[in-house]
Image (cartoon, helix red, strand yellow):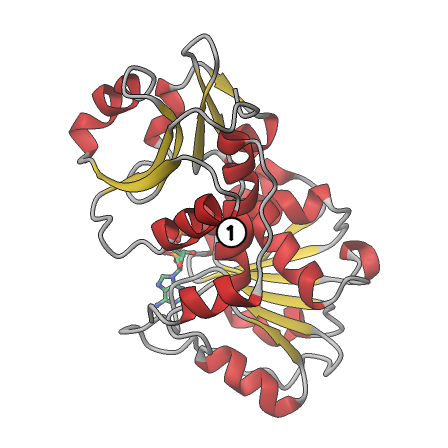
Amino acid sequence: MGSDRSQYKLAGVMGWPVAHSRSPVIHNHWIAEHQLVGAYVLLPVQAQRLQQALRALPALGFAGCNLTIPHKVEAMQWVDHLHPMAKRIGAINTIVVEPDGSLTGKNTDGFGYMQSLLDVRPDWQAKAGPIVVLGAGGAARAVIASLIEYGATEIRLLNRTFSKAQELSQEFGIPVQAYPWESRDDALANANLLVNTTNQGMHGEPALDIALNALPSTALVSDIIYVPIETPLLAAAKVRGNTTINGLGMLLNQARPAFESWFGVRPEITPTLLAKVQATF
Ligand code: ATR
C-alpha cells in the first residue's frame, strides 16, 4: 500500500482536544519533502465517537492515523491486529489501514524515546547501568517497554503513588524495581540515565520535587516534556554538567515509523524540520 507514490493518501491525528498538535507540521513537511500526494489533518473526535471514526478511516481513503488524548488506550479494543510492542505498552499511538481495510494498532512512542537518546549519544547502552524512571502512567509504560527491549537490566521506578510503581514492576518483571518517592536519593545513586515521564515541569505545572545531588555527573538526564523545551529538571541537570535530552526528539522520532508505514518512505529529522517545529512554540 505504501509503495504507490502517486496515489492520494490521507493521514491525521485523532484526539480531543487536538488543535494544539504539532503532528500536522511534521508530517506535512515530510509529504512535501518527498513529493508525495496527500495530506495530514487534524481529526477532532470525541471519546464516544472513537469506534465510528476509526471504522470510517478505510472508506475515507486514510492510510492510517495517529491517536492522542483520550484515545490511546480505548482504541486498542477497536483495531483488528495489535503489534506485540503495543500489547506490552498497553496503548496505541498509530493505526495503519491494511490493504484489506483492516486496522493494525502500533505504538511508536517507545521507539521515539530510544531514538531521541541515541541521536544524542549513539554509543549509549541500556545495560550499562541502573536507569531511573519517574512516573508510572502511560508514557512511563512506553519508555519502560522500550528500555527493556534495548537491553535494560535494572530500571528503578519512582512514582508519587507507590502502588502504581509496584503494579508496573510486577507486570514488567525483574528488570523493574519499584522505589517509594521518599527514596529518590537511593534510586539516583550510580544511575546511568534519569528520565521524567510525569507532567511535573510542564508549562503551567510546578517543577518536579527532586534533588539531583546523588546522581553521577556522567548520567544522561532526559525529559519527555517539550513545552517548555528546557524543563526545570533539565536546567538543574545542565548546571551540574549532566548531558540533557529534551522531549522534542521523542516527538519527532515517534512520527518517523508512523509516516513510513502510511507513505512507504522513511523520513529524516533535518535542521529545517526542527526549526519549523520549534517555531510553533
Ligand atoms: P501519561 O499518559 O502522560 O503518562 P498519566 O497516565 O496520567 O499520564 O501519568 C501521569 C504520571 O505523572 C503519574 O505517574 C503521576 O503519578 P501518580 O501515579 O502518583 O498519579 C505523575 N504525577 C502527576 N502529578 C504528579 C505530582 N504532583 N508529583 C509527582 N508525580 C506526579
Residue at the outermost top position: 100
Viewer can see residue 168? yes
In this rendering, the answer to whether 226 lies above or below 25 is: below
In this rendering, the answer to whether 53 lies above or below 24 is: above
In this rendering, the answer to whether 235 lies above or below 108 is: below
Residue 130: image location, x then y, percent: 74, 62
In-image side of 197 versus 75 (left or right):
right
Frontmost residue, 80 versus 278: 278
Q: Residues within 10 Å of mark 1 (few under 14, many from 20)?
A: many
Residue drawn at (59%, 91%), measured in percent from left and top? 239
Frontmost residue, 234 versus 44: 44
The amino acid type of the residue labelled 1 equals Ala
In this rendering, the answer to whether 168 lies above or below 261 is: below
Residue 12: image location, x then y, percent: 34, 38
Q: Quadrant of residue 161?
A: bottom left
Ligand 1 closer than 8 Å to label 1 CB: yes
Return the residue at label 1.
140
In-image side of 30 versus 54 (left or right):
right
Residue 235: image location, x then y, percent: 51, 85
Residue drawn at (25%, 21%), measured in percent from left and top? 51
Residue 139: image location, x then y, percent: 47, 50
Frontmost residue, 92 versus 135: 92
Residue at the outermost bottom position: 239
Residue drawn at (64%, 90%), measured in percent from left and top? 240
Residue drawn at (40%, 11%), measured in percent from left and top? 101
Q: Quadrant of residue 93?
A: top left
